């Protein structure tokens, strides 16, 4: 084998397997404050990377000693710089809060005490119902509460615009800028020292390892669903044969290069524009900050697009008998909020394992389960579409609401299509939970844990009856299943029970995607597509065409 072939073989082996040898923990990127920090407090290299260098480059003993010392020097310098920056930033934030004698803090506490006292009186007036004078008292208390809330909004604006707060924000911005500058300088110095130790043959392995290290560092900082997906880790979990992995190499190599480029672009943009974000935060002139966040969202969507495209390419290259398993695993890993098994899924699986279950009942449960999976597959596609379209916009919306609060404006949340799609999915799940309850005895229901719907568990946990959150904008219970309408539709002989012929009609109704007892119209909505077949539950497809969406602009 030629030297070139050996090097190519080594690179491919590293690309596929080494990432798992010293696996990095995957944590979703933090919130708005972590965006402001731009990852400045996170080192680019850690002491545990030494083993990776040793294995990848097959370092000689002398090289290992030198590389270990370079790593320790980097680690010590970075810790010293980041500790100093964190102390300075912490002191600045503490000065924003003020001490107990701070007039803004005292005024805020006084307003809170007044607000709590009025709320207590308002609760007492509500408990007295329609007794004489209660409505007038409630109106008066409500007006007083609104006045206090307006005073609190104005007090928040005054505090934010105070010289003390503005000075503290400027100090934080300078500290973050210096930390980011030092971090870049330390990384470049470390990498320069490292490559100086390597031989020419070892240097040929550096680009592949460098990409791997970048992925390990930047993938976990993603904030979007699907943005943190590590394709190589997913493949390693499948334990595929060497022949299968060899067939997947084109897709793996393409992802390796493309996702690294996308991650670097995303990270560089945030670092370069950290000052703009801090300035927008200080002045509350959010126009420039919003533009930065919008571009950051598009760059994050590009990372997700690269990951989703890699999954689609792998599904095309995999043997047919391995497609469905990898499709399901990748969906649950990339979009767990959408594709992980729900409580209703687990309830149906557990119900089929009940002892003493009548064969007819088991068959109906299986029919319900097949129908549910078809409807959930459609709901999942709608939820995935909403996620692709709206998730990156949520960060921009949070900044806008923050600016509105700090300038005395309204900070109401906008309608969220993702939440609406999730609610629609929960309605389907709760309806099928009701159907399952109707087939079982009280003892069987108890054995399955009670089969409470989400709204029932929330109400019980919070000690409340009908929550506002359990109703839609029209005041209707969005989690309810209209059993009366259901029986009216299918109990043709009106005896209050479902006969075998009536059950067959129900099964046929669900197979054809019919409505649920008058509760809904067409569940597919726009772009719904077809549900899963019995042999391919969960809506998996060989091409995986439904997950990738369109490429970000």
Image: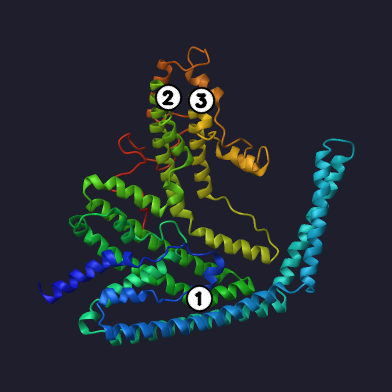
- Binning the other alpha carbons within 10 Å of mark 3 as few (below 14), some (14 to 19) or many (20 upward) gives few
Which mark identifies residue 357?
A: 2
Mark 3 touching mark 1, by CB under 8 A? no
Q: Residue at x 65, y 74 (%)?
A: 93
On the picture, is 497 further left or further right than 370? Answer: right
Q: CA distance from mark 3 to mark 1?
A: 56 Å
- Tag 1 residue: 41
Q: Judge by depth and name the residue closer to the eye, 142 or 235.
A: 235
Q: Earlier in the sequence, mark 2 or mark 3?
A: 2
Residue 68: x %, y % from top left: 36, 82
Q: Residue at x 62, y 64 (%)?
A: 402
The answer to whether residue 128 is left or right of residue 347 is right
Mark 2 and mark 1 lie on one chain; the one further toward the N terminus is: 1
Q: CA distance from mark 2 to mark 3?
A: 14 Å
Q: In which quarter of the view is residue 146 placed?
A: bottom right
Q: Between tags 2 and 3, which lies in front?
A: 2
């Amino acid at each position: 084998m030629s030297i070139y072939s050996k090097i190519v073989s080594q690179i491919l082996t590293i690309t596929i397997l080494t990432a798992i040898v010293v696996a990095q923990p995957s944590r979703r990127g933090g919130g708005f404050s972590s965006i402001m920090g731009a990852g400045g407090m996170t080192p680019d290299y850690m002491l545990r990377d030494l083993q990776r260098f040793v294995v990848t480059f097959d370092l000689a003993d002398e090289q290992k000693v030198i590389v270990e010392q370079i790593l320790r020097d980097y680690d010590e310098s970075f810790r010293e710089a980041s500790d100093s920056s964190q102390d300075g930033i912490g002191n600045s934030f503490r000065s924003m809060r003020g001490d107990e004698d701070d007039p803004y803090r005292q005024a805020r506490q006084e307003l809170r005490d007044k607000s709590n006292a009025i709320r207590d009186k308002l609760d007492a007036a509500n408990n007295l119902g329609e007794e004489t004078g209660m409505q007038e008292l409630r109106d008066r208390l409500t007006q007083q509460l609104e006045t206090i809330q307006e005073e609190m909004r104005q007090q928040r604006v005054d505090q934010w615009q105070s010289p003390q707060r503005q000075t503290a924000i400027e100090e934080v911005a300078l500290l973050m800028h210096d930390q980011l500058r030092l971090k870049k300088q330390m990384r470049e110095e470390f990498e320069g020292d490292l490559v100086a130790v390597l031989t020419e043959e070892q240097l040929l392995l550096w680009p592949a390892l460098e990409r791997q290290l970048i992925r390990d560092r930047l993938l976990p900082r993603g904030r979007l669903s699907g943005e943190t997906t590590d394709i190589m880790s997913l493949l390693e979990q499948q334990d595929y044969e060497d022949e299968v992995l060899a067939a997947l190499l084109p897709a793996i190599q393409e992802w390796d290069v493309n996702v690294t480029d996308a991650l670097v672009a995303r990270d560089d943009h945030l670092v370069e524009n950290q000052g703009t974000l801090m300035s927008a935060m200080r002045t509350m002139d959010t126009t420039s900050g919003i533009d930065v966040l919008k571009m950051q969202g598009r760059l994050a969507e590009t990372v997700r697009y690269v990951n989703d495209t890699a999954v689609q390419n792998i599904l095309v290259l995999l043997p047919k008998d391995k497609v469905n398993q990898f499709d399901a695993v990748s969906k649950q890993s990339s979009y767990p909020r959408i594709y992980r098994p729900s409580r209703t899924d687990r309830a149906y699986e557990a119900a089929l394992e009940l002892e003493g279950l009548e064969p007819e009942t088991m068959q109906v449960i299986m029919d319900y389960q097949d129908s549910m999976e078809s409807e959930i597959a459609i709901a999942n596609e709608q939820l995935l579409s909403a996620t692709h379209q709206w998730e990156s916009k949520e960060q921009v919306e949070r900044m806008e609401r923050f600016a509105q609060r700090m300038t005395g404006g309204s900070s109401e949340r906008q309608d969220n299509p993702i939440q609406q799609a999730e609610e629609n999915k929960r309605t389907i799940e709760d309806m099928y939970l009701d159907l399952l309850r109707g087939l079982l005895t009280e003892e069987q229901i108890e054995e399955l844990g009670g089969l409470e719907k989400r709204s029932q568990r929330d109400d019980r946990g919070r000690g409340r009856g009908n929550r506002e959150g359990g109703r839609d904008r029209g005041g209707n219970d969005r989690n309810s299943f209209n059993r009366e309408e259901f029986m009216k539709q299918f109990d043709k002989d009106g005896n209050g029970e479902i006969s075998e012929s009536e059950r067959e009609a129900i099964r046929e109704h669900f197979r054809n995607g019919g409505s649920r007892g008058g509760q809904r119209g067409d569940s597919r909505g726009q772009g719904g597509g077809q549900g899963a077949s019995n042999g391919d539950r969960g809506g998996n497809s060989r091409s995986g065409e439904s997950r990738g969406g369109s490429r970000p602009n």
